[in-house]
Structure formats: structure tokens, C-alpha cells
Image: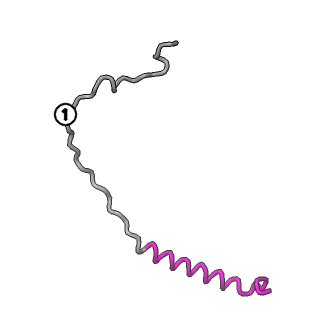
Amino acid sequence: MPQLDTSTWFITILATILTLFIIMQLKISTYYYHSNPEPKTTKMTKSLIPWEIKWTKIYSPLSLPLR
């Protein structure tokens, strides 16, 4: 059985590691890194319609009346 012959293991493992190293270097070198984002100024907009009171009240289960 050729798998049990350990004389070729070193060459096989070395060739595999070298091939993977070269492939990974090529993949990483072609990767496009985005530039750092720059902060933008934000404008505050006024709401034309004010909030309705019925939508702003928080109903907590503990504050509801008991039945």
C-alpha cells in the first residue's frame, strides 16, 4: 500500500504547504480594501407633523388597571 510508505510524505506535505501559501498570497493580494470612511455632516430636519399624544404614551403592563 503506497499510503504506508513514509518516504514521500515530506515532499508531499511540503509541496502542499507551498502551493497553498502561493495561492493564498495571490488571493489576498487581489483583495480590494475599502478606504476609511470619512464623517459627514448631518442636517437636522424639522418634522412637519407633530407626534400625536396617543402614540407616544407607553403602556406598561404593571400600570394597567386590574380586572
Q: Position of residue 47 (x, y in %)?
A: 21, 34
Q: Position of residue 16 (x, y in %)?
A: 61, 80
The residue closer to the viewer here, 44 or 4, is: 44
Residue at left offset 34%, top offset 26%? 55
Amino acid type, callout 1? Leu
The residue closer to the viewer here, 56 or 32, is: 56
Is 25 included in the stretch rendered in magenta? yes
Identify the residue under disc 1.
48
Magenta stretch: dominant secondary structure: helix
Rendered image quadrant of residue 51: top left
Is 43 included in the stretch rendered in magenta? no
Q: Where 18 sits versus 66, above or below?
A: below
Using a 10 Å C-alpha cutoff, classify the residue at mark 1 as few (fewer than 14 neighbours), some (14 to 19) or many (20 or more).
few
Q: Where 2 sits versus 33, above or below?
A: below
Residue at left offset 47%, top offset 13%? 65
| Color theme of the render | one colour
Q: Position of residue 45 (x, y in %)?
A: 20, 39
Rendered image quadrant of residue 52: top left
Q: Position of residue 14 (x, y in %)?
A: 63, 82
Tell me: 14 left or right of 6: left
The residue closer to the viewer here, 58 or 5, is: 58
Residue at left offset 56%, top offset 81%? 19
Q: Where 3 sits versus 24, above or below?
A: below
Residue at left offset 48%, top offset 21%? 61
Tell me: 5 left or right of 66: right
Tell me: 15 left or right of 44: right
Identify the element where label 1 is drawn: loop
Q: Quadrant of the N terminus?
A: bottom right
Q: Which residue range is magenta in the image?
A: 1-28
